Amino acid sequence: MPDDEQWPEWRRADHFQLAAYVTPEAGRALPIEGINAYDAASRPGGRRAVAQAIYDTLAERNIRYALEEYHPSEALQIIRTPAQILEAPRQGTCLDLAILFCGLCLTYELLPLLIVAEGHALAAVSLTHGGLFKTRGSGFTEIIIGRNVLAGLHIDLNSGQRPLRSLERSYHTTLSTPEKPLRFERISGLGEEQIDELERRVALLLERPWQKKTGRPRGLTLHEALIVTCGYLRQNIIEEVWADIFGVSQATISRSISLLTPLVKRATARDRPSRTAAMRAVRGTIALVDGTLWPCWSWKGKKKLWAGKYKTTGHGSLIITNLQGHVIYISDPVTGNQHDMRKLKGETAEKILKKASGVLGDKGFIGTSYITTPIRKPKSRKLLDWEKEWNREVSSFRAPVERAIADLKAWRALFTDYRRPLGTFENSFHAATGLYFFKASFE
């Protein structure tokens, strides 16, 4: 099977088909300096030394773990060729890398063993049997995982029995534990299907491919960079922590967020309700409206960010929902010093609300003719019982919009102080709210 072309898909139910992908032609894609096919059997410890040299050479290529390539059929999986693994962006699944390792072993007259467990694959090498099966007797097989050479199975190729036996070093590992891609849903806010769709949209917006065919590959794949960008908006974790999670520099994280946030904003623009869609949604219904603050750092010289109502700095918006709490419209952010009525007068939010059959708001909207609000306590007396009951009724009807704001602020870049440069807030705001609606579109 040629290694410089796309290989036929693997039928997952047929494990024996995997043997077709293990080819000594892999050696053409990765020549290993300092060893040859005769070193394995020509000197004591030769097979171990050759296996170690193969591993070391692969490790120097900085190949990263990646998810399998998309295929519309769950019964089939695309196996990357050696050339595809070793060239930019230098990535592969555990199965891709195990097959490559076994192919290189065949190139240098080693006898490899491809082990496929549930959700995981790894490679083993016989230290007593060569690729031509000329030796006899029992011997140890060492399992190569990561940077450790783990003592594994004692295999008698004549009898076929596999009794467990320890070597001079003892490691504890469970081969039946499935290896699965890291679950980033909690930190990114998006499920696997959602991340894949977002990646497809963003890839179409890139001016040039994420990974260049030549030169130094990026530290993060596009998939990983999107997880970081969405995760930053979801969790507002400092960049140094993201760098530790993905094993890259803080600068790489910062560049990825700066580059992709505007693209996420554009990629999710279709999911954010437009003015026309919002007017159509409220027509003939009861609408709820409330104001909220998106906090940020207290930037020197930016006094207009101070919101006296909230006793902190930030930007404010109006949120419009229906009685079920579904967000219909979010106004563009303005400086925190602006009162809710100022955000409303003459703006798109006012035009939308006037299309509704009725509107409920809090005391910040007292004075409008079309918004039903609670009764403010007069200075000269206490509220009457019926006035208190009225306020309770209005507040109970308004609860869905407050819950919707809480759901929006699950994207914590909108809830905790925004730390990135002030000029980037608008892009981050639209990206975060876009992701909120994008995620809701899958439900």
Image (cartoon, rainbow, N blue to C red):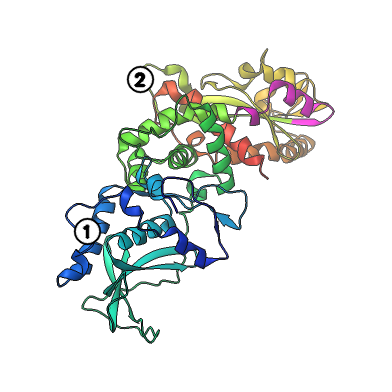
Q: CA distance from mark 2 to mark 1?
A: 57 Å
Q: Nearer the viewer, residue 104 or 187?
A: 104
From this view, report whether residue 64 is shown above or below residue 208.
below
Q: Is residue 402 left or right of residue 102?
A: right
Amino acid at dot 2: Lys
Q: Earlier in the sequence, mark 2 or mark 1?
A: 1
Q: Residue at x 53, y 44 (%)?
A: 189
Disc number placed over residue 300 in the picture, else none:
2
Q: Nearer the viewer, residue 231 or 69?
A: 69
- Residue 434 rendering spot, x and y as whole percentages: 58, 32
Local packing at callout 1 (Cα closer than 10 Å; few below 14, some 14-19, many 20+) is some
Say whether residue 310 is visible.
Answer: no
Circle 1 residue = 53
Q: Residue at x 34, y 37 (%)?
A: 217
Local packing at callout 2 (Cα closer than 10 Å; few below 14, some 14-19, many 20+) is few
Say whether residue 180 is visible.
Answer: yes
Q: Which residues are magenta?
A: 269-287
- Residue 351 rendering spot, x and y as whole percentages: 73, 17
- Residue 399 rendering spot, x and y as whole percentages: 69, 40
Q: Nearer the viewer, residue 76 or 403?
A: 76
Q: Is residue 370 left or right of residue 183?
A: right
Query: Which dot, 2 or 1, sits closer to the camera?
Result: 1
Q: Tell which residue pokes out farthest to the top in this image.
A: 346
Please check the rendered image and state whether residue 271 is part of the magenta-colored stretch, yes or no.
yes
Please check the rendered image and state whether residue 112 is part of the magenta-colored stretch, yes or no.
no
Q: Quadrant of the C terminus?
A: top right
From this view, report whether residue 93 is shown above or below residue 4.
below
